[in-house]
Image (tube, coloured by chain):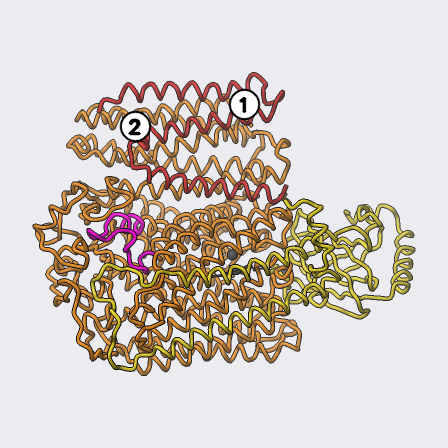
Chain colours: A orange, B yellow, C red
Amino acid sequence: MTDDNQPRTDGGTATALPGDSHDDDHLPPRWSLKRWLVTTNHKDVGLLYLATAMFFLVFGGVLALLIRAQMWSPRAPGTGVLSAMAYNQAVSLHGLIMVFWFISPFATGFANYIVPLQIGAEDLAFPRLNALSYWLYLASGILVFASFFQGSSFAGGWTLYAPLNIPAFMPSIGATTTVFAIVVFCASITVGGVNFLTTIHRMRAPGLTMRSLPLFTWSWLLTAWMMLLAFAALLAAVMILLSDRMLGTTYFAATTAGGSVLWTHLFWFFGHPEVYIVFFPALGAMAEIFQTFSGNRIVGRKWFIVSMVLVALQSFIVWMHHMFLTSINLEVKTLFMATTIGISLPFDLMVFALIYTLIKGRIRWDTPMLYAFGALVLFIVGGITGVFLGAVVLDYEFRGTYWVVAHFHYVMVSGVTGLIAGLFYWFPKMTGKTYDEFLGKLSFAVYFTGFNLLYFPLFLAWGTPRRVFAYRPEYVGWHRLASVGAVILGIAFLLIIYNLAKSIVAGDDAAANPWPYSTTAEWAVASPPPIENFPGKPSYVSGSLEFLDDDATAAAAADGGTAATDGGHAALESGHGDDVHVDHASYWPVTIGLFTLVTALGLSGLQVGSYPSGLEGLFYQGASVLGVVGLLGSITAMGYENFTAHEGGLGEAWPFEGVENTKMGMWVFLASDVVLFGAFIGAAIFLRVAYGWTQWHPIPHNPIPGLVNTYLLLTSSFTVILALVAAQKRSRKGVVASLTLTFLLGLGFLANKAIEWVVLFSEGTGLDSSVRASTYYLTTGLHMGHVIAGLLVTAYLIWRAWNGAYTDGNDETLEYFGLYWHFVDIVWLFLFPLFYIV
Amino acid sequence: MIPDSTAASVLQSGLVPQGTRVQVFSEIYWVFLGLGTLVGAVVIGYMLYNAYKYSYQGGVDEEERPKLGEVPTGGGKGKKLFLSLGLSAIIVISLIAWTYGTLLFVEGQTGEQGVDVQVEGYQFGWNFYYLDDGGDDYTGVNTTNELRVPVDTQINLQVTSDDVFHNFGIPQLKVKTDAIPGETTETWFEASDTGNYTAHCYELCGQGHSYMDAEVIVMEEDEFQDWYDSQNASTNNESAANVAAAGV
Amino acid sequence: MARTKLYTGIYVALFVIATMQVAVEQIGLLESSYMLALGLITVFSLVKAVVVAGYFQHLVWEPRSVTYVMLLGFVGFLALTVAASYSIL
Ligand code: HEM
Ligand SMILES: [Cu+2]
Ligand SMILES: [Cu+2]
């Protein structure tokens, strides 16, 4: 790599210490498989994410090559390497895998590894949840893989448009499994989002204010916020879809007024933020790399951050630019045209900021910089062609053609390019080895050539409709060029993988800081960093990074170092993990992941309310039961496990000072739940508006039973409050009594609801009777699911309280459960009038 | 949203591309392409220039460079940033505003005169139902996978679907709209030359999507009239029940 | 922290508002003046939700940022619902 021939001084005491890994003995050694199953350490989890994402890159890449093989010539019916259905599966799963199972997890891998190092945290706030989000991700990926073997995988495009996505048009079990995989993936993202948001907001080193957060961390922070809210909307969409497929509700059925358009709203409300979710981490990596390799601090840093924040917010108000050809009205088109242009402007600023950072630099063209620079070039081309699409009259013609395909590959794969820059940049840090610089540069040359050969001709062949393999013969030349480019790009990826694999085995040892002019904290520790990351407590208070010894940290504690738990028992933790034991291993995340996989596989057999007959059905039913039982057991076990994690609030915690980690995590989770319910409620309102608002009447004949349920829930909220009050008074009896009352009230709610449903069923009003009935059953059903989950937790709490928990001064668990329970109450306060009164 | 009078005066000013959809598209497309290429070339050129100029070449360094462990800060004040942002904003916003006039023109054009046809997508083909002058009632003339229209006449399409989400588009005539079950979208086109064109489906709709084409035959006005009358005569011979069964 | 009295008062108020909400329907206001009834019912729900969030969930005693996080989710819901519904009007 680069040899810096100029002597340079380090700021402060930030010198790398050799890794002292005495804590490693909490974990099995790296060469043991067991370590990778039980580890909760952010660096290990990061590597797992990266490796798995690379696997999916290859998987999605093979599908892409199949697509390009089919596109070699315009195919007459029945000819070509793929059948029509195989082709449809290939385009659909290629898109899904690249967007969900490759790019985001790839970025998550870096975030896992680098973000805690950059902010001076020893680990994430909830290490076990971090491992859990990885295992859920892997489970969802295995589901995708399995879907190919269950008849047919999903074949309706990565946008999953309705009503092609319902069993009437796509009956295979594999298609259900694909949708289920997305559900599990959303769960993984939500768990991860909660974790990162809590960590970045509350676990920064003293002196590291939001304004001075490194740009990669900033980009990931905003990514996590967008993920949290956008994926909640997607989760709602795919849950409704699953319900249509498995239970037989009729949201998206062809006969439903507005069903197809509803899907496009739900999907793109998620879909547009998603394009920034995949791009932001790359942007952050590019910003770091541009600074390091040009030897300049980024120009207009503050405005760069402001721009990112603006984009993150605006990304939620542009979704209808994907729907300009649907039946939406002109006013809305105008509005969304304006917001779309609005969102391109902050991007302009960021692009210019990166370019101006080069000026007066001493630019070193190592592999990371080559990729980062290339990524910016590609992004500019993608952005300019995006402006074409923002002009509605042009979009009318480009929509559904290869123009869109070319545009979004330029932007998205520019993001991939930026992440590959990050891969080379952080490779020495993550592996402690030096990659082969020559091979790296060679791979860039091949990559850049292949990329442009592949995607640029698609602009020229833009008259080709998307997702077809019979196109006008005049485009053959361009499509062949693209296919050749695809092979070259594939070779580039193989070169990259070969280079890195070879270097892991036989590369030279890397220095702690191989790059001149790098500034961020990950370069101030050994490569790879020791398990506790830092040789002391990191602090920026003096103006630059210092590692303080432990005595000094007590004074820096801003938050009174209260109990830190990962959902399990409370244990007191303060300062650095030398004298205090911190856990790094748990079996439960991988177990939960496994049972999630089993559950999803089992339930995927459920088609419109019934399992297949015979042995096959038996398999699916058995797996469903086994999975659910295993899930309940392993979640309980994880809750009960003694696991100590690092506490937050010891350094910078703006703007959540004083909101203890677990509490903040709970609130952030609830925010995503607001969006989940919001999307369900929004779907019901939308369908009702499409149908004619006043033509719709409540399904229950009479609001009084619903009112009774409102009373029951309100009272149960009150008893949860009483439980907390009792705990504060250290009254065990009071706690147990109040919780038991809560439990009984909740049961009453469920019983009342059950009676209502039984009566409705007996009158012939089923889930599939009408859209109106579907929305009523599913939305209140989702709420009921929340009540049931709450009651399961209540039962657990009662048992623990009976044994003396919560009255020993550690009543946080009760408080956090209360937050959830009151939230369920609040949701009902809206569902009740919507579905029973108006 | 925009007062009609303002919209009308902008439309009449001559600045806004109007005409058939082929004409407005190519006018706008070429302007975008020209400016887009220019902007792209300038920006990327400027990047490459700086990349070359400031490449590391050893020698003494007068600048104060970033140090490991420093609190991240920015370089430069960003004045130049806002200048470039302002410039690009002006280009982008004025371009889009300019095309907005055409959007109003295109949207305002629907259903005023010409021939009205209802298009219905199904897996995997297209039905065309010819409507009466007001575009309200089915005349009994219908075709499948073949749309015949007169030249130099505005053709108004009311597009829907019988099963899944499709999208009806005729690339050479620059018209396209979604075919959504339970909904109707409206659009129009006008062909300036007689001849045969092909309509495609632009939304993945299942197994036969790649071949979900229809032929569009643009005829001289009187030829079209002859064809239409002959169709009309044959349908009039059929019973009224058949017309009702077409479900339109 | 003896806020028990406060909590009890709030609980009673919630009970009353819930009853009033149904009363709006029972007195036939939905038939006679739909928009007014709809408005009233919505406001009642909002008031109840704010009170539960503010006091039972302790939002009034937490840093304001927590409230903003929840509002963020709520605004997302509003944006989706209102814009989507409006788009097909
Ligand atoms: C200047 C900025 C951008 C503008 C104005 C823009 C505009 C658009 C528009 C209007 C569409 C809809 C085209 C259609 O389907 O008719 C679109 C599609 C798309 N854009 Fe962008 N875009 C921009 C940047 C990005 C970025 C940064 C990404 C991702 C990293 C991205 C990813 C996508 C994707 C994935 C689609 C296609 C979705 C699909 O139909 O499958 N865009 N863009
Ligand atoms: Cu978008
Ligand atoms: Cu199609």
SS at mark 1 in the image: loop
Compared across the picture, whether B110 is left or right of A422 comes to: right
Q: Is residue A133 covered in magenta?
A: no
Residue at 30% from the left image edge and 72% from the top image edge = A293
Q: Which quadrant does the N terminus of chain A fall into?
A: bottom left
Q: For disc 2, does the CB lie below 8 Å from ligand 2?
A: no
Label drawn at residue A702:
1
In this rendered view, identify the residue nearer to me: A749 or B159: B159
In this rendered view, identify the residue nearer to me: A634 or A97: A97
Residue at 13% from the left image edge and 63% from the top image edge = A13
Find residue A156 and report its image quarter.
bottom right
In percent of width and height, residue B99 lies at 64, 59
**Which chain's residue wears label 2?**
A
Q: Are marks 2 and 1 in contact (CB under 8 Å)?
A: no
Q: Amino acid at mark 2?
A: Val
Q: Is residue A203 covered in magenta?
A: yes
Q: Which quadrant does the C terminus of chain A fall into?
A: top right
The verdict on a common chain for dots 2 and 1 is yes
SS at mark 2 in the image: helix
- The residue labelled by disc 2 is A720
> From which residue to which does the magenta span run?
A195-218
Circle nearer the N terminus (2, 1): 1
Distance from the alpha carbon under mark 2 to that under mark 1: 29 Å
